[in-house]
Image: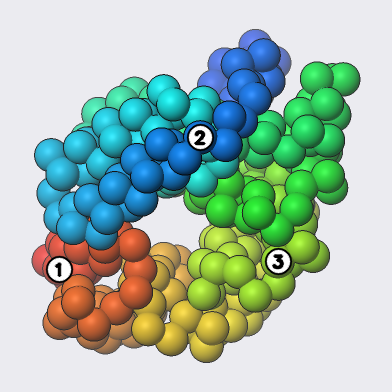
Amino acid sequence: MQMHKGVLVALLSLCMLSGCGRKNWQSSWQEARQATGSQQAELLYAEARKKLEQAADLDSILTSMDLMQRVLATDPAHREALAYLGNLHILVGTAYTIDQEEKIFHFRQAMKYCELSMYVNRQFREAVKDGKEPWVACHTLQAEDAPAMLFWVTALQYEFKEGMSLPGKIINVGWLQHGITFLDRIEHVAPEFGNGAVEFAYSICYLALPSLLGGDIDLGKSYLEKSIERGTGYLLPTWGKGKYFHQVTGDLEGARKDLRWVASQKPEDYKDLYPWRMHFITDAKLQLDSL
């Protein structure tokens, strides 16, 4: 066992020295465009959202994504379309993709679309243009940027969980602190936003971070309870408690109880984005089988 630990430490040291596995941020502000305020874009966006509320499988989700792209062809700086394209890339990456490299592609595309949504905010765009990283410049973002900020953090968390090896997670765990910075900004400018999703994202960060970097299991649990309290009518908090918190803390019976509850629900009774509702129910059933 000691030899294995020594090998792992040596491997991690080499990775850190060489930059192997390190997640780097690349600016995309040059791709930002001016909003046109097109009425046609708004009509296309309404059509895309309507389609999205009926999307129960990969084909219908991809159709919704194509409709969002049509919105952007008319108005390339449509804040909401950009943010929801990010959201859908996350869903495709976690629910419909097996290959790790494909997952990373979708999660990073999600972060890029979310940043493009944030660049609609002129102050944020100028700050990044001047060399500031998004988590440094996020103090310029406002309430209308909350969806893009939340989805950016969610994509980061999914890449961390599903796209990184154990050495990659150790090397890149500090990125979750950037996630907390964005969540803090959401709390400041849009404290009522998210229906428990912001608190859930906080809980994931605090559960995953080591204590040396601010991780705190008790704080993570506290945020999770707040998420459930604020998320009445939403499946996300209870699904997340069953899938993540109980399994991290070793309470498998608690995990089964929450996942059983989610698996037994009818999607029409809840308010999460429809394809996510379907994913939570399906995934809860898969989790129960694996437990």
For residue 112, the mark is: none
In this view, the mark in front (1 or 2): 2
Judged from the image, the secondary structure of the residue bearing numbered disc 3 is loop
Q: Which mark is residue 190?
A: 3
- Which of marks 3 and 1 precedes in the sequence? 3
Of residue 232 and residue 83, the one placed in the foreground of this image is: 83
User: Residue 38: which numbered mark, if any?
Assistant: 2
What's the mark number on residue 285? 1
Dot in front, 3 or 2: 2
Q: Earlier in the sequence, mark 3 or mark 2?
A: 2
In-image side of 72 versus 258 (left or right): right
Q: Is residue 26 visible?
A: no
Q: Nearer the viewer, residue 214 or 47?
A: 47
**How many other residues sit within 10 Å of disc 1, few (<14), some (14-19) or many (≥20)?**
some
The percent coordinates of residue 218 (x first, y second) are 65, 78
Q: Height in image: 18 above or below 197?
A: above
**Image quarter of residue 115:** top right
Q: Is residue 179 left or right of residue 147?
A: right
Q: Which amino acid type is marked by label 3? A: Ala
Does residue 70 show up? Answer: yes
* Image mark count: 3
Quadrant where the C terminus sits is bottom left
The x, y position of residue 283, in whole percent, is: 21, 61
- Marked residue nearer the N-terminal end (1 or 2): 2
Q: Position of residue 144 (x, y in %)?
A: 66, 54
Q: CA distance from mark 3 to mark 2?
A: 26 Å
Q: Residue at x 18, y 58 (%)?
A: 54
Q: Residues within 10 Å of mark 2 (few under 14, many from 20)?
A: few
